[in-house]
Structures are given as C-alpha cells and as structure tokens.
Image (cartoon, rainbow, N blue to C red):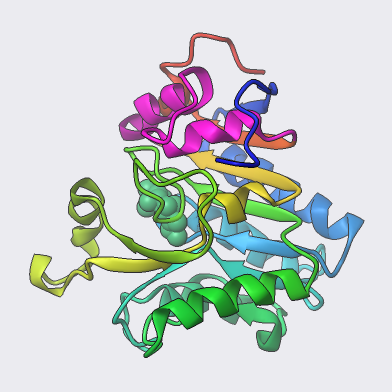
Amino acid sequence: MAHVNLDRRVKPTVIVAESPEAFSRVAADVITRQIGIRSDSVLALPTGATPLSLYAELARRCSENLVSFAELHSFNLDEYVGLDPEHHNSYHAYMMEHFFSKVDIDMSNVQIPNGMAPNREAECARYEREIGAVGGLDLAIIGLGANAHMGFNEPGTPFDSRTHVAELASETSDANSRYFAGMQQMPRHAITMGIGTILEARRILLMAMGITKAEAVRASLEGRVTPHVPASVLQTHPHLTVVLDRDAASRLTVSPR
Ligand code: F6R
C-alpha cells in the first residue's frame, strides 16, 4: 500500500442520472471533454453491461462528427484467461462489437490484455510497459462489481497491485456466468490492470447502475477504505467522478448533486 495515503479523503463529484439517456450522456460528456483537452488521451476502458449505453452514445457522437477517437490510445481493464480474441465471450469481441467497429479509432492504438499469452507474467509486464510508454492513463473508466471489484481486482487485492492474473471471486463467476453456455465454460482467471495501475490514472470515472450495486456504491464512497472493498480506495483519488442511476445511488447518505 506504499503510495496510497489512506488519510487523504477527497470529495468526488457524484452525479445521479434521472434516466438511462442522462446516464450515458453525462458519462459520454466526461470522455468527450477529456478528448477535447487532448485528442491523443490515454483511456482505460471497461466491458460489461454498465458501459453499453455509453459506447452507443459515443458511437453516435462520432458518426455525427461531434467527437473523434482517431488519435486516442485505449487500454482495456481486463480480459479472460484462456479465451481467444475471436471467442464471442472475450472482451476483445465485446469491444469490437460495441465500440471499436463503430468509431474512427486507430486499431494500432488499441490494447487489450492477451488472455492466450503463453507467458502470462510477461504479458502483464508488457501491458504495464505499454501504458507507461504512452505516458500513463489520463482517464480510467471503470464499472463496479456488486462486491465492489474494479477490473477483476476482487476483495483482498492489495491497493498497490499492478497488472496481474486474478482469480475470479465466486460471486463474480456467478454474475458473469449468464453470458456463458454454462459454469463449465466460464474462465476462472483473468488478466486485469491492478488497483495501483488504475489509481495512477490522472482522472477516474466510476459508473454504476442498478439496485444490485447500491451497497457496493455506499461502501465504496462512504465506508472505510479497505482492500476488502476494492473501490473504497477511490476515496483517496483527487479527481474522481461518479455517475450513478437512482437505484445505485439509493443507499448513499450524503446527498449527491
Ligand atoms: C469489466 C470489468 C468489471 C465490470 C464489473 C461490472 O471489464 O472490469 O469490473 O466493470 O464487473 O460489470 P457490469 O457492468 O456487467 O455490472
């Protein structure tokens, strides 16, 4: 936990969206603003259900020439171990389907961990080097697990962890198994950016929607900063924006703006 100052709590900007449209608009505004500041920004990108409407909104803006991703560098947060990029459940396939194929991004600037790498440790080290080579993350966009994981950093992951191979928590396997033909098909491991990697991003956008995330949102934003609640470490980040829907925000005691 070397570089995490637990005493330093910073008030995040918390936005509660009143509709699904507002949710994707507000989240897309954060990204569009970042690209407006620097067209060659470096983003960390999530998969899952939460960012689907965000990616659709960004694709719409791109098709209307309101934003361009041509110079963007992107690094996905994670990828399952053992899934070929062509596998329909891989995060490669997800990103192609929902975002990369719909925008003007230069695919040579796209990075996703290689879950098929024969030497996983070397792949994790390579990923860290690639992030460093483009100057580090400007904006990390992250979703939240019901157990407050971010990326596949499950409860107990050290705050100073770097990109590593993680074992999925049983609740994560349960939640994600709906996308697979059966539990047997579900990978047990993933390569994920570490918490330390994410924390070094200059800005972080955390998104959560739905009642199943309400307790994780409360614990992450208002609870004790502890590795048992991975996203609680975000309380120490100086530039955190949180976009929630009403359900995900429903257990917050401090009224958001
Ligand atoms: C996915 C990822 C995960 C998800 C989280 C929430 O790349 O990093 O941490 O963001 O599991 O998933 P959804 O949005 O499906 O509820």
Residue 22 in percent (x, y) is at: 61, 38
Residue 87 in percent (x, y) is at: 32, 85
Bounds of the magenta span?
Answer: 210-238
Residue 179 in view, yes or no: yes
Location of residue 109 by image quarter: bottom right
| Quadrant showing the C terminus | top right
18 sits to left or right of 81: right
Residue 204 in percent (x, y) is at: 66, 45
Residue 63 in view, yes or no: no
Residue 187 magenta-drawn? no
Q: Residue furthest front?
A: 2
99 sits to left or right of 73: left
Residue under the point 61% across and 17% down: 256
Give the dominant element type of the magenta stretch: helix, strand or loop. Answer: helix
| Quadrant showing the N terminus | top right
Residue 171 in percent (x, y) is at: 21, 46
In the figure, 175 relative to 216: above or below?
Answer: below
Residue under the point 34% across and 87% down: 84
Q: Nearer the viewer, residue 90 or 60?
A: 90
Residue 228 magenta-drawn? yes
117 sits to left or right of 67: left
In the figure, 32 relative to 108: above or below?
Answer: above
